[in-house]
Image (cartoon, rainbow, N blue to C red):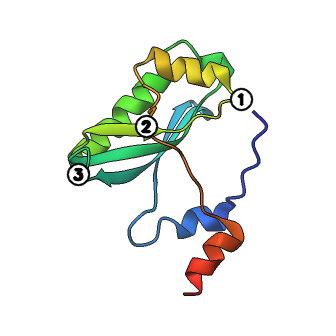
Amino acid sequence: MGDTHLADRKALETSFMGNPAFNALLAYESADMFGVLVWSPLFSTTRGGGGLFVSDLWVASSARGQGTGRKLLAHAISDAEDSSGACFVRLAAHRNNPSACSYYAHIGFDEEADMLSMLLEGSALQYFKEI
């Protein structure tokens, strides 16, 4: 997709100190990586338990259609179930990536009509850091 990724090696390593900020699953064949899933634990009082937020799910075009995405999701759900119980999975997809949106709908994700994804960053986030 040509996304710009601002996380460098130091940011990734720092995120794993103490309580990890995220979990990552990598799919390899020999030395070639062909799939990645990054997720973080969540808790929802309205859903009544723990869940996971998938921030990144990527499968190489050469490996698509072989169940890699489903296997990565199943493994992440199993990991979350073992650590905190998993009663839901949430993710966000870029609307300008219709193939991803179609894939997620195909495997059972529903658009949350009553939810609006919002983001706090930059100077607005800095304001809260200075309070």
Please say if 67 is above or below 56: above
Residue 118: x percent and y percent? 56, 52
Element assignment for label 3: helix
Q: Quadrant of residue 13?
A: bottom right
Q: Is residue 93 visible?
A: yes
Judging depth in this view, the residue of 17 and 106 nearest the camera is: 106
Q: Quadrant of the N terminus?
A: top right
Please say if 11 is above or below 68: below
Mark 1–mark 3 Cα distance, whole angstroms, equals: 33 Å
Name the residue carrying label 2: 114
Q: Quadrant of the C terminus?
A: bottom right
Circle 1 Cα neighbour tier, 10 Å, few/some/many (<14 / 14–19 / ≥20)? few
Name the residue carrying label 1: 96
Q: Earlier in the sequence, mark 1 or mark 3?
A: 3
Give the mark toward the camera: 2 or 3: 2
Q: Earlier in the sequence, mark 2 or mark 3?
A: 3
Element assignment for label 2: loop
Check disc 2 and give the amino acid type.
Asp
Q: Relative to residue 68, is residue 63 drawn left or right? A: right
Q: Quadrant of residue 121?
A: bottom right
Check disc 3 and give the amino acid type.
Ser
Element assignment for label 1: loop
Q: Earlier in the sequence, mark 1 or mark 2?
A: 1
Q: Is residue 67 visible?
A: no
Q: Residue at coordinates 30% horizontally, 53% vertically from top-left?
A: 43
Mark 1–mark 2 Cα distance, whole angstroms, equals: 20 Å
Q: Residue at coordinates 47% horizontally, 28% vertically from top-left?
A: 111
Q: Residue at coordinates 70% horizontally, 68% vertically from top-left?
A: 122
Name the residue carrying label 3: 84
Check disc 1 and give the amino acid type.
Asn
Q: Residue at coordinates 43% horizontally, 45% vertically from top-left?
A: 53
Residue 95: x percent and y percent? 65, 30
